[in-house]
Image: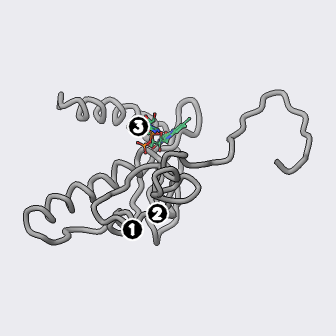
Amino acid sequence: MEGVTLEYDLLVTIPPHSGMDVVDDSKLGKGGWATTDPATLQHTEHSDIFVIGDTTNIPISKAGSTAHFESEAVIANITSLIKEGCWSRYYDGKVFCFVETGMDSGAYVWFNYTTPPNPGPPSQMIHRLKLAYNCLYWLSAKGLL
Ligand SMILES: Cc1cc2nc3c(=O)[nH]c(=O)nc-3n(C[C@H](O)[C@H](O)[C@H](O)COP(=O)(O)OP(=O)(O)OC[C@H]3O[C@@H](n4cnc5c(N)ncnc54)[C@H](O)[C@@H]3O)c2cc1C
């Protein structure tokens, strides 16, 4: 991108992020990102559309964990809007992720709109906790727990 040539043995590279054409084609956003209210996760121009996951334009990381915590806020709000006609909570930008730091060690980070990520020291215990969490998460998602 910058016209620089580098020599390498193994290249691990990440292409520039871009959104989906379908968002622009549907006039729901710009550059493939749907314009989203960071607190309510409503589309900024269509109040009956809620947006979660990678397609939002909110200033938070694109991660499965982000979509997970966003969905909790959206589900709570759709339920309370239908039942009581009011909002029950705002999304505060919460994300929690495990980070593998080696073959047998891991750490975790959590952050939100106002608190930047601050990973703790890696350990084998956190790595094992992550492996267990993976199993529990998918068993729970399949309704087996
Ligand atoms: C290599 C890699 C590693 C990652 N590791 C992690 C991790 O360790 N932890 C973590 O939390 N996150 C991780 N992520 C990020 C995570 O995968 C995404 O943030 C998450 O999947 C976003 O979910 P989503 O539902 O918003 O979008 P997606 O999972 O991308 O789902 C969008 C869906 O829409 C479909 N679609 C697109 N266009 C159309 C259309 N026109 N009509 C119909 N369907 C359409 C796509 O096919 C896709 O199935 C990783 C991502 C990558 C690429």
Q: Are marks 1 and 2 in contact (CB under 8 Å)?
A: yes
Location of residue 96 in the rendering, given as x and y in whole percent from the top left corner? 41, 52
Rendered residue at 18%/31% (across/down): 143
Q: Quadrant of residue 44?
A: bottom left
Left or right of residue 117: residue 79: left
Label 3 sits on what residue type? Lys
Name the image quarter holding the C terminus. top left
Label 2 sits on what residue type? Thr
**Which numbered disc, 1 or 3, marks the residue that appears first in the sequence?**
1
Q: Mark 1 falls on what kind of element?
A: loop
Location of residue 41 in the rendering, given as x and y in whole percent from the top left corner? 35, 62
Left or right of residue 136: residue 31: right
Disc number placed over residue 35 in the picture, else none? 2
Disc number placed over residue 45 in the picture, else none? 1
**Which numbered disc, 1 or 2, marks the residue that appears first in the sequence?**
2
Distance in Å between CA atoms under marks 1 and 2:
8 Å
Q: Which residue is mark 3?
A: 130
Q: Are marks 1 and 3 in contact (CB under 8 Å)?
A: no
**For the image shown, how many numbered marks are present on the structure?**
3
